[in-house]
Image (cartoon, helix red, strand yellow):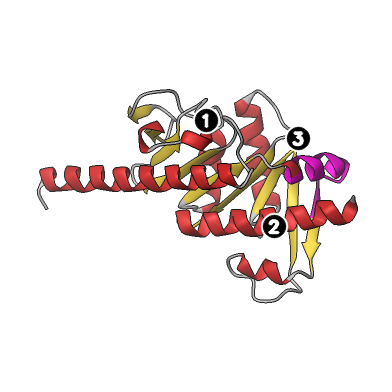
Amino acid sequence: MHTESLIEMSAQNFSKMASDLAEVGRDFYRRGWVLGTSGNFSAVLNREPLRLAITSSSVDKGTLAADHILQIDEQGSVLEGNGKPSAETLLHLSVVRLRGAGAVLHTHSVWSNILSDAHAEKRGFSIEGYEMLKGLEGVVTHEHREWLPIIENSQDMAVLAKSVEEALLQHPKSHGFLLRRHGLYTWGKDIAEAKRHVEILEFLLEVRARSEG
């Protein structure tokens, strides 16, 4: 295939990913999971070399548009788009590398904040017995026990990325993790699967928080 055709295909792929991520962001805003400028989302455009589409920093998710999505490389440097990538770009890159994720979505719901604080000393908690667990990739029974690690938040992204990597390696079957007093991270093979995981986990977090309260 000619170089021009490859470049055109790459541009079309980025445009589609940007539109899909923006749509997800606006949807999550309406559900109250990413109010204001909170939350960030990414999707893999290419593996070799690694290229990600990711939300620009400090953008209101209620008005998120394709123009707010950047293309970055494996170092987090901007290759396309205007703005600065999310401060948590290193966390997205860690999840992509260690989980082979095709998309990574991060929300800031009330329920994730409550539970991540309440169970911080145990560094996580389990959810089991709910039919909704079967919406997670690879889960076939409500008897599944899902462990959600809780990671202490930090403004030092290099330190936080290392903590995330340690948690991912320690809990290889977990479908997500919580940053304390911050929010939920989950992922999937593509944007659609990652979105489903957010919906499932946010439902379960709300049920768990309400039952404890």
Say if mark 2 contacts mark 1, CB within 8 Å.
no
Near mark 1 (Cα within 10 A), the count class, few <14, some 14-19 or many ≥20, is some
Residue furthest bottom in the image: 141
Please indicate whether residue 187 sits to the left or right of residue 150 in the image.
Answer: left
Disc 2/disc 3 C-alpha distance (Å): 18 Å
Disc 2/disc 1 C-alpha distance (Å): 23 Å
**196 relative to 95, above or below:** below
Residue at the spot 65% in from the left edge and 40% down from the top edge: 164
Indicate the quadrant where residue 121 lies: top right
Please indicate whether residue 195 sits to the left or right of residue 140 in the image.
Answer: left
**57 relative to 6, above or below:** above
**201 relative to 57, above or below:** below
How far from the left and from the top, in percent, is residue 41? 50, 41
> What element does badge 3 sit on?
loop
Three-letter amino acid code of the residue under disc 2? Phe
The residue tagged 1 is 60
Main SS class of the magenta portion in the image = helix
Three-letter amino acid code of the residue under disc 3? Arg
Report the span colored magenta.
111-125
What's the mark number on residue 181? 3
Which mark is first along the chain, 3 or 2? Answer: 3
The residue tagged 2 is 203
**206 relative to 53, above or below:** below
Residue at the spot 65% in from the left edge and 32% down from the top edge: 160
How far from the left and from the top, in percent, is residue 176? 65, 51
Residue furthest front in the image: 30
> Does the segment drawn in magenta span residue 116?
yes
How far from the left and from the top, in percent, is residue 90? 54, 33
